Image (spheres, helix red, strand yellow):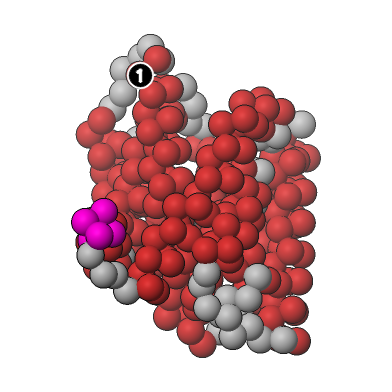
């Protein structure tokens, strides 16, 4: 594993974790090119997930601090803003479906579905799903506010991210649009909803890493983490600005092209 390898992996993770373009699809391609496996690959996955989670927590630090204050005030039976309390409950209940399904099905998915062919197929299906969400949005633009029920419904869509090739952010943003949130509100909720899940994924990978034997080049991996963190901060800011003015259509076409490319890599690798 070389310095350039971890920089590329960190950059790819930082860019793709929060854009609706599937980090799995891109990492399948990158790993085919860089040929990274074993204990270092597991360490990279774990640390890069923590790095991108740290980025979204830093970016939304004011929102997170307010939610902590709301929780403390609620426990102290002090008055709180209804909107903030709704967001807190929506995040809590929206996290549950993906956690439950992930615990039950992740071993099956890891064993049988993490192939380039499956990733290519799901990438294509995901693009059609985003296309449908945008079509519905254009026909009847939603004007709804976030509610606890809508938070749970978006959490159900987040379960789709267990499928390799389905973008977590794409599934939750499109799902939020379908249940009645504006595109910007769905995106903001998607980013906040990512925090507990990505923390959990990073923690699980770290536990798996502790059971592996072999030496880990922590210096190189730390550099990759720094790249992922910085890149993710830029991407989050860019995407929020982008989604205020534009639609998901560019990501729909990009996903279709990526599906074809991953499928081609799968064919020539046979």
- Rendered residue at 74%/41% (across/down): 118
* 191 versus 121 height, above or below: below
Segment tinted magenta in the rendering:
73-77
Residue 5 can be seen, yes or no? no
Of helix, strand and loop, which mostly describes the magenta segment?
Answer: helix
x and y percent of residue 10 in the render?
Answer: 38, 48
Q: Position of residue 213 (x, y in %)?
A: 38, 12
Q: Nearer the viewer, residue 65 or 24?
A: 65
Magenta stretch contains residue 75 = yes
Which residue is located at x 64 percent, y 56 percent? Answer: 157
Q: Please tell me whether residue 12 belongs to the stretch shown in magenta.
A: no
Residue sitting nearer the eye, 223 or 57: 57
156 shown above or below 45 = below
* Crowd rating for badge 1 (residues with CA inside 10 Å; few <14, some 14–19, many 20+): few
Which residue is label 1 attached to?
A: 210
Q: Residue furthest top?
A: 213
The quarter of the rendered structure image containing the C terminus is top right
- Residue 97 to residue 126: above or below: above
Q: Secondary structure at mark 1?
A: helix
Please tell me in which quadrant of the rendered image residue 40 appears. Answer: top left
Q: Is residue 39 left or right of residue 96?
A: left
Question: Where does the image place residue 131, in percent across and percent down from the top left?
Answer: 73, 71
Q: Nearer the viewer, residue 95 or 109?
A: 95
Report whether 27 appears left or right of 110.
Answer: left
- Quarter in which the N terminus is drawn: top left
Q: Quadrant of residue 64?
A: bottom left
Residue at image position (74%, 79%) is 136
From this viewpoint, is residue 14 visible? yes
Which of the 4 quarters of the picture holds residue 108? top right
x and y, in percent, of residue 145 in the image: 52, 78
Above or below: residue 58 compared with residue 107: below
């Amino acid at each position: 594993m070389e310095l350039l390898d971890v920089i590329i992996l960190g950059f790819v993770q930082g860019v793709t974790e929060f854009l609706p373009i599937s980090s799995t699809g891109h990492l399948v391609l990158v790993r085919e090119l860089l040929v990274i496996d074993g204990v270092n690959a597991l360490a990279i996955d774990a640390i890069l997930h923590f790095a991108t989670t740290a980025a979204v927590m830093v970016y939304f630090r004011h929102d997170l601090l307010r939610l902590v204050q709301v929780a403390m005030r609620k426990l102290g039976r002090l008055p709180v803003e209804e909107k903030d309390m709704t967001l807190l409950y929506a995040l809590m209940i929206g996290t549950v479906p993906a956690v439950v399904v992930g615990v039950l099905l992740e071993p099956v998915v890891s064993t049988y579905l993490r192939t380039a062919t499956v990733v290519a197929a799901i990438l294509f299906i995901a693009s059609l799903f985003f296309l449908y969400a945008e079509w519905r949005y254009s026909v009847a633009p939603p004007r709804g506010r976030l509610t606890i029920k809508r938070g749970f419904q978006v959490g159900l869509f987040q379960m789709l991210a267990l499928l390799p090739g389905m973008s977590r952010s794409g599934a939750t943003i499109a799902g939020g649009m379908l249940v009645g949130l504006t595109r910007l509100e769905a995106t903001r909720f998607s980013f906040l909803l990512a925090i507990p899940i990505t923390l959990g994924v990073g923690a699980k990978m770290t536990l798996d890493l502790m059971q592996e034997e072999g030496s880990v080049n922590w210096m190189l991996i730390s550099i990759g983490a720094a790249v992922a963190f910085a890149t993710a901060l830029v991407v989050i800011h860019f995407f929020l600005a982008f989604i205020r003015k534009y639609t998901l259509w560019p990501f729909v076409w990009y996903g279709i092209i990526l599906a074809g490319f991953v499928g081609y890599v799968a064919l020539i690798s046979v």
